[in-house]
Image (cartoon, helix red, strand yellow):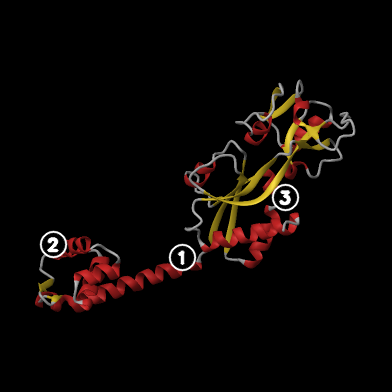
Amino acid sequence: MDVQKMKALFVAVELGSLNKAAESLQYTQAGLTRMMNSLENEIGIRLLERNHNGVELTDEAKSLAPAIKRLIYDYDELNEEIARLKKSHKDTIRIAALSSIAINWLPGTIKHFSIDHPNINADFRMIDLSDPIDQLLERDGMDVVLTSKISKGKYDWIHVMDDTIYAVLPPDFDDGGQQTFDVERFNGMEIYIADRGFDPDMLRVMESVKAKVSYKAAGVEDKALINLISQGLGAALLPGLAVRDYGNKVKLLPLSPEAHRDLGIAVRSLDDMSDAVRSFIEEFTDFVKKTENLA
């Protein structure tokens, strides 16, 4: 038997009206009536006496009332105990993050978060831009995805920072004294791209101009790619967060026209986040603001 139906039964009797009970429980009157009929069929006796004064328990239902109330009480006690046991265990937040975010922002965030929330574990994995945000959240069960917003989807987005995209060039590249790099100068150059999927942020920039470039697949991390370019082997477009510690090995020039990627946080729903996830997001955004001197 459904305990919720039994609870609804006593609400109806207390209020003396199925209509008032339906309003109180946020059901339709027809829905509550079907529920009461279903409960009577399950028990096998008529429970409600309907008359011009409203509804009241039948004599048979009155004899069952003490036992039904004990059942409801025991049910609520069980649920409270289950909730208490769940709270006694550590919550786990599942985080997916781009490597540049994982390297630069996650360690500090998790350190401070663990101090403030010792009963919450932070479990994270590295991803790249070929991993669809929707699938990470729905299929893979991630609570938070720290990434670049490259497409719309069934998720909510929290913007954190605009990350400037740079031309990554060999150290002896002749920049002509320019402080920026005109994207059209990539014409005829070899540009590295990731061989796992593609880099939507880079392609978006290149599609904005008519430069004809030769793309080279590179199955290496950003650090290894920068080492290749430092030896005069091609060029690349990389975000500032990925290259910030390598300006002494290669030439880094912001693009003209200016380009950036939208770094932020993807969650399934801003309205349905757990307290643990909400606390982690607050810790993460605060850490980034302090680290990057954001207003």
Q: Residues within 10 Å of mark 3 (few under 14, many from 20)?
A: some
The correct choice, above or below, for 234 with respect to 44 in the image is above
Q: Is residue 227 left or right of residue 3?
A: right
Compute the Cα span from label 2 to label 3: 62 Å
Q: Is residue 37 left or right of residue 222?
A: left
The correct choice, above or below, for 262 with respect to 204 in the image is below
Which label belongs to residue 86? 1
Tag 1: amino acid: Lys
Q: Which residue is mark 3?
A: 104
Tag 2: amino acid: Asn
Compute the Cα span from label 3 to label 1: 33 Å
Q: Position of residue 228 (x, y in %)?
A: 79, 30
Q: Position of residue 210 (x, y in %)?
A: 69, 24
The residue drawn where x is 14% and y is 78% is 62
Decide which of 120, 237 is in the foreground and name it. 237
Compute the Cα span from label 2 to label 1: 35 Å
In the picture, residue 46 is in which quadrant?
Answer: bottom left
Label 1 secondary element: helix
Tag 3: amino acid: Asn
Q: Which residue is mark 2?
A: 41
* Quadrant for the N terminus in the image: bottom left
Q: Residues within 10 Å of mark 1 (few under 14, many from 20)?
A: few
